[in-house]
Image (spheres, rainbow, N blue to C red):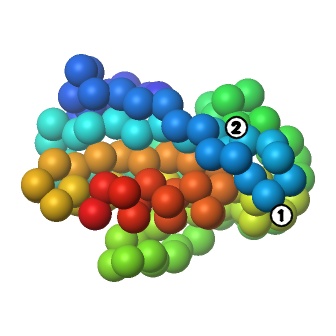
Amino acid sequence: IPEEIISFVDNDNFYLSLMQKADNSYSRGFIIKLKNDVGINVALNGWEINMSANLKTLFGLDIEQAASVNFLDNTYQGVAIRYRNFPDHFLTIDYAVVLEANGDKYLVVTNSKDHIYSIIDRLR
C-alpha cells in the first residue's frame, strides 16, 4: 500500500478476508478502517496506476491479461466501487470506501465483485 494511502489508515484495524467462490477457489481481500477520509479518493485514484502490480501476488492476477486498461465505475447499495477486470469477473480488483452504520469508514479491496458486495452488505 503506498504511503499516500497509509496516511489515512487506522493502524489498529486491518482485516484480511477470504470468501469461497462457486469454483471452490477463494476470493481474497482486505478491509482497513480509515482514521480520515478527506482526500482518500484522490489518493486511491493515484494508486490505480500501480494497484494491479502491487496486488498481483496477493490476488493471483496476471496483469498482462487485464480485460480493461483503466479502472471502471460501479455502485452497489449506494456505495461507489472502482474495479478492473482480468480474465473474468471472478478475478478482479474491486475497491470502495464504505461507511458503516455507526459512522466508521473502511477501505475495502477484494479480488471479486461478489466478495466486495458481501462485505458492503455486512458493514452497512
Specify the label residue 61 is tagged with: none
**Dot 1 and dot 2 residues touching (CB under 8 Å):** no
Tell me how far mark 1 sits from mark 2, CA to CA.
13 Å
32 in relation to 123, above or below: above
Residue 92 is situated, as x and y percent measured from the top left of the image, at 70, 55
Q: Secondary structure at mark 2?
A: helix
Specify the label residue 59 is tagged with: 2
Residue 82 is situated, as x and y percent measured from the top left of the image, at 51, 64
What residue lies at 22% left-to-right and 28% top-to-bottom? 10
Please state the total of marks drawn on the protein image.
Answer: 2
Query: In the rendered structure, which disc, 1 or 2, sits on the residue that comes first in sequence?
Result: 2
Which quarter of the picture shows residue 12?
A: top left
Q: Amino acid at mark 1?
A: Asp
| Residue 111 as seen in the image, left or right of residue 75 | right
Specify the label residue 88 is tagged with: 1
What residue lies at 49% left-to-right and 60% top-to-bottom? 118
Which quarter of the picture shows residue 119?
A: bottom left
Q: Amino acid at mark 2?
A: Phe
Residue 94 is situated, as x and y percent measured from the top left of the image, at 56, 56
Q: Secondary structure at mark 1?
A: loop
